[in-house]
Image (cartoon, rainbow, N blue to C red):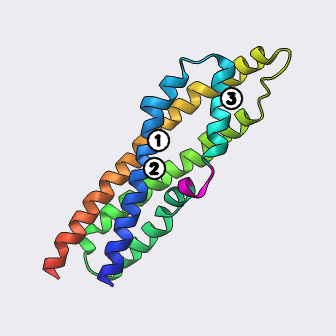
Amino acid sequence: MRALQTVTLLVATLGAGLMAGLFAAFAYAVMPGLARSADRTFVQAMQNINRAIINGWFLLPFLLPIPLLLLATVLAWNGHGRVALPWILAALVLYLAGFFVTSGVNVPLNNALDKADTGGSGGDDRAEAARTAFESRWVTWNAVRALLHTAAFGVLAWALFLHGTAAGTT
């Protein structure tokens, strides 16, 4: 049981860390770099990124921490290392908040941007309008989800530490 708790916490921590890193990289590198682009280039680049990111390498660390954190909560409640339970619950709340920001704000913005047609006559005007409707809101909410996932990662790292130190007390 203890080994399952440890593996569950470790994999959830790694997943949260990967998501925190991805969203932070968008906040401090990708979006500032794209901000220097022309409207059409910006829209096309984001369309390509949003299409490319939907793959197993993204979805696994994005989705897996949720059931793992639920399992970690149950295991901590019923098992060893209960001292980590409040931190696991805090991580679950933070991670779910970041997940809902992504699914409730960033993904709908991505989907709307995906429909933008920047080709042909008037493409520059359509690209400018699409970018205006997308960029500042997406960047703001990406920063929010980056902070939430980073906090979840930090709290999970602490929970993992507490879980490990509890091994000597049980």
Residue located beneath label 2 in the image? 19
- C-alpha gap between disc 1 and disc 2: 6 Å
Question: From the viewer's perspective, is the residue at label 1 or at label 3 nearer?
Answer: 3
Main secondary structure type of the part rendered in magenta:
helix
Amino acid type, mark 3: Gln
User: What is the magenta range?
Assistant: 54-58
Residue at mark 1 to residue at mark 3: CA–CA distance: 20 Å
The number of numbered discs placed on residues in the rendered structure image is 3
Q: Quadrant of the C terminus?
A: bottom left
Determine whether label 1 and label 2 are within 8 Å by CB. Answer: yes
Residue placed under numbered mark 1 in the picture = 23
Which residue is found at the position 38% from the left and 59% from the top? 14
* Residue at disc 2, secondary structure: helix
* Res. 56 image quadrant: bottom right
Above or below: residue 16 compared with residue 2: above
Q: Residues within 10 Å of mark 2 (few under 14, many from 20)?
A: many
Looking at the image, is 63 positioned above or below residue 116? below
- Mark 3, residue position: 44
Pick out the residue farthest to the left: 168
